[in-house]
Amino acid sequence: MSSAASAIDGHDHPHNPHLAHHFESMEQQHNSAKLGMWIFLVTEILLFSGLFLAYGAYRAFHPEVFNHASRLLSLPLGGFNTIVLIGSSLTMALAVREAQLGRGRLQALFLLSTLALAGVFLVVKYFEYSHKFHVGLLPGRWFAPHGHEAHVAQWQNVRIFFGIYFLMTGLHGIHVLMGMAAIGWLWLRARRGEFSAAYYTPVEVVGLYWHLVDIIWIFLFPMLYLIDRSPMH
Amino acid sequence: MSTATLPGPIPHDHDVGRINYLHSHRGVMSWVYTLDHKRIGIMYLAAVTASFLVGGVMALLIRAELIDPQLTMLPSNKVYNQLFTLHGAIMVFLFIIPSIPAALGNFFLPIMLGAKDVAFPRLNLASFYIYVVGAIFAVISIVLGSVDTGWTFYTPYSVDTQTSVVMMTMGAFILGFSSIFTGLNFIVTVHKLRAPGLTWFRMPLFVWALYATSIIQVLATPVLGITLLLLAIERVAHVGIFDPLMGGDPVLFQHFFWFYSHPAVYIMIVPGMGIISEIIPTFARKPIFGYRFIAFSSIAIALIGFLVWGHHMFTSGQSEIAVMIFSALTFLVSIPSAIKVFNWTATLYRGSIDLKTPMLYALSFIFLFTIGGLTGLFLGALATDIHLHDTYFIVAHFHYVMVGGTVMAFMGGLHYWWPKMTGRMYPELLGQITCGIVFLGFNMTFFTQFILGSQGMPRRYATYDEQFQPLHAFSSVGALVLGVGFAITTAYLLWSLWKGAKAPRNPWGSLSLEWQIETPPIHQNFLETPVIEGMPYDYGVETGSGH
């Protein structure tokens, strides 16, 4: 809205250039954006809920398959990634804090750290996936265990576990990628000094989204990697 | 207003805000990039109406084939299967779900709240284009090999069929995002953008209905998204989620599908109930009876509606205890719907009823929806459902709710708000007569199908036993009458855009907020944020003014 227009509005204070015409105040706009993001997060949880339900149903149908197959996932890599993602949530929270206080330089640094940690997560995931591809622990029609995992083929219904594993971690990985795009966009804007104590809504809203991505992983990790780690009998 | 026609410098934003929304910006691109909820509503209206006409033509083709017990007009059974699948998918995903919320709701929800726009105008425009992309996917699927699974895409057939299930389900998946974004936008708008004085219990009941609908859209649609995604992955990769050979379960697909699609029928009907709650008090000149009951019953439908999906699977092999619980919950969800019908009827009692076209559609709604709702109880009862399951009875029940309910409400709302949206009056007498034609044609088509179904005629067959022919032929004639009714409506509404009388600000003498502003509304809806002092339905109540 042009400055001439705000003069006609009869407001005493100048308009924040980020205030959209249909909101009365920055506070109203900020709260709307936050509520919108929370509702979006609810839809995300429900999107994943289908997979969680499928996981629950098939683990109940075939508990032994899940117990055995879970051991084929790499605990060190999965555990490392869990720590990486929790760390990225910390840097994201710090970035939001810095944005609220209007401190631009540190804020950009924390955003960049979050981006880097997300990148580390995906690189580790890449190595996990390629190992599974290598030994043929693939979803669906491509499932063909060989090498030192050849014995897995004898277990009935085991491919359903890997189907669910790839679906859940794959969908989560796509969300990590989308989060990285959003955080990268924030980083560019933060470097241009666009955020201030009066306007930091995008940082906070993307932060909420990033924490959800993190929380979903915190559920995925024990459900997929930690089902039964006692020695095989 | 005159600033619109003055040559000279480009007007300031603020001046543009004073001009009626149809003229505030000029050129095709001003529509393509518009963030105005009213223009987006109009674009949605054009899109859903076009979808409705396409889906309607398919219905006519289906009915034409069914005049004769043998396959006569269509080349094969497969084409018949493709036709009824497309009819269902187009009507559900491209017409009914977005019809009232995204078209009429988009236009009127912000105005009824005293707001200048929805909370997220860009998301609103995005939702429209996502809808268009989803529609394009659906069209591509028709070209590649139209789906023949029925609109429910049941596994295992949907995994095995040679038709382009992936393209169609991806279209529905994309349309789901459009629906989610509209719902999300409405929820935030209702929470955050109400005008001063507009408390929750002063909100128009249409807003309550849209709010309840939005809750369902936001909570249910993502589950459809993941379901369709899984189905597409199942087809491409054979992951085995729905395949017993690999440890999966096809019934899980049905659970997933109906967890969305049963609440989705409330996405389709609740906004219609909201329209009826606006039309009835306006044309009965009485305050609505039981305002809070109607408001809360919308929320109750939204919530209980999530717990009844298993009644679509009474014969699919659920446990007996699950079946009984789902049956009981199904009876429970009929209570809030009945509450609404009783309250509308009570509002009519001793009202000063004016039988304008919107009111005729509203009365049709009450009559037909009641039949549709009560026959739903036949299907919710376990023993009768075994007999009626997968017969024309269920087709008739569904169409009584969706056409007799939602489409009647949509037509009522369209006529009711047409003057406000377009600035033109539709021809009243023609509207009333056409409503009669639609009502007659509808009942001829679908009441017949209750009888067919109870006699055992199964749904989804192109050929049938000789004994059913008279009823089928009668139903087909009814469909033609219904089609003529909709064709006349389309023709006179389009005609009115050019030749219709100029609409006054408030042709119905309504008290609700959208009728107090300019016709057509100005770009920013209100020059000054209104302060709300009363109920929208204070007809005959001595409170000075409604607002």
Image: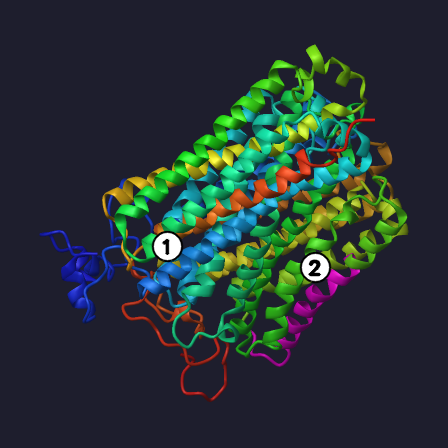
Quadrant (top left, top right, bottom left, bottom right) of the N terminus of chain B: bottom left
Residue B379 lies left or right of residue A25; in this view the side is right
Q: Nearer the viewer, residue B304 or A214?
A: A214
Residue A230 quadrant = top right
Q: Is residue B426 visible?
A: no
Quadrant (top left, top right, bottom left, bottom right) of the C terminus of chain B: bottom left
Dot 2 amino acid type = Ile
Chain to which mark 1 belongs: A
Local crowd at mark 2 within 10 Å, few (<14), some, or many (≥20)?
some
Residue B121 in the image: state x and y as whole percent: 37, 52
Which span of residues is magenta-colored?
Answer: B330-353
Dot 1 amino acid type = Arg
Q: Which residue, given by chain and number where applicable, does mark 1 sit on?
A: A97
Residue found at the very far front of the displayed protein: A231
Residue B482 in the image: state x and y as whole percent: 62, 46
Q: Nearer the viewer, residue B168 or B139?
A: B168
* Marks 2, 1 in one chain: no
Q: Which residue, given by chain and number where applicable, does mark 2 sit on?
A: B304
| Residue A150 to residue A31: above or below | above
Residue A182 in the image: state x and y as whole percent: 39, 40
| Residue B536 to residue A82: above or below | below
Q: Residue drawn 64% across and 59% down?
A: B302
Residue B28 lies left or right of residue B58; in this view the side is left
Q: Residue drawn 89% across and 48% down?
A: B320
Chain to which mark 2 belongs: B
